[in-house]
Image (cartoon, rainbow, N blue to C red):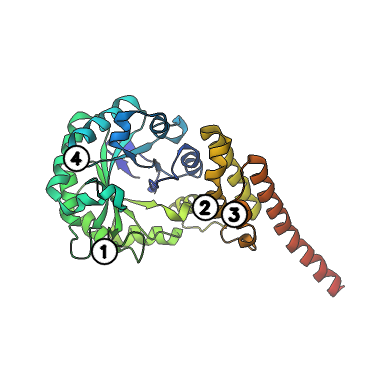
Amino acid sequence: MLKIGDIEMKNRVVLAPMAGVCNPAFRLIAKEFGVGLVCAEMVSDKAILHGNKRTQEMLYVDEREKPLSLQIFGGDKETLVEAARVVDEQTNADIIDINMGCPVPKVVKCDAGARWLLEPKKIEEMVSAVVKVVKKPVTVKMRIGWDEDHIYVEDNAKAVESAGGKAVAVHGRTRQQMYRGHANWEYIRLAKQAVSIPVIGNGDVFTPEDAKRMLETTGCDGVMIGRAALGNPWMLYRTVHYLEHGELLPEPSPSEKIRIALLHMDRLINLRGERIAVREMRKHATWYLKGLPGASKIKDVVTQQETREGMADVLLTFVRELEREPAAEQANLQQETA
């Protein structure tokens, strides 16, 4: 089992904190699909202190999602500490995570996210300042380094541990790579060897077999799944099952995929209202459709939908036609062989 501070997970599979994706609607689905820990999308420290309605929504935690890690980011110690205090005292999140891996320019320019990777001393200073004022366990999500010439993953992991951090998640790419190329798991192994706190490996885990291989080759304590779960929460369930029983469960049927997609949309509507939710659901719908025969033909139609009824009609019509075709082919085959 994976344990962070006094928070014990039921397994070693973690949902990554993906921006624009990991709201309560998707997180709850991930939890229902068996994941041990869900991570909320990152929230700016200054936005938390400003306290607008959208930020308050991002800090909401459904009790059914727990245990949950809520991620914050910022480059100024004073505001980061105060934001952490808000999360600690005013939310029911279980863990406070500090982002030092986000590679996007607007975050890095604020001296936040992956910018920290260049300064192990700053990491220790900032994490220590947060740990001193909160009761919840503090963790860090990092990348292996800034670029190939500036990889300080061992020193950075040690800095987190020295500061009182209870775990560190390591994405095997540099900031320069963004989301391109391959994740280098060797640096995850080095981070694990450098510290005694739990290390969660992240990057290029696309199948249950990948998850097992990461755990075995790096020695990490948990495996974090991000993009592979987009439109595919079955990846989470299949990974948990594979790690516990060594059995690969089958992929979901097209109708099962659409059933969960509709559930996802309805939860988004309850969360955000129909107009915003359906627009947000467009990208999720294309992810749920990925890999299904003929899905490319309706992608443009999906991305034009404005209502719940319209989106549901497109998806249900597609899956009915898809499942009718094999039946028709089977009937034709029987007639030919009669």
Which residue position holds label 4? 127
Q: Residues within 10 Å of mark 1 (few under 14, many from 20)?
A: some
Which residue position holds label 3? 252
**Residue at the (15%, 53%) spot, across then down:** 155
Outermost residue, top direction? 90
70 or 21: nearer the eye? 21
User: Residues under labels 2 and 1: Cα distance?
Assistant: 27 Å
Asked if disc 3 and disc 2 are in contact, CB closer than 8 Å, the reply is no
Disc 4 secondary structure class: helix
**In the image, residue 218 above or below residue 277:** below
Which residue position holds label 1? 186
Q: Amino acid at mark 4?
A: Val
Q: Amino acid at mark 3?
A: Pro
Q: Quadrant of the C terminus?
A: bottom right
Disc 1 secondary structure class: helix
User: Residues under labels 4 and 3: Cα distance?
Assistant: 42 Å
**Residue at the (79%, 63%) spot, across then down:** 328
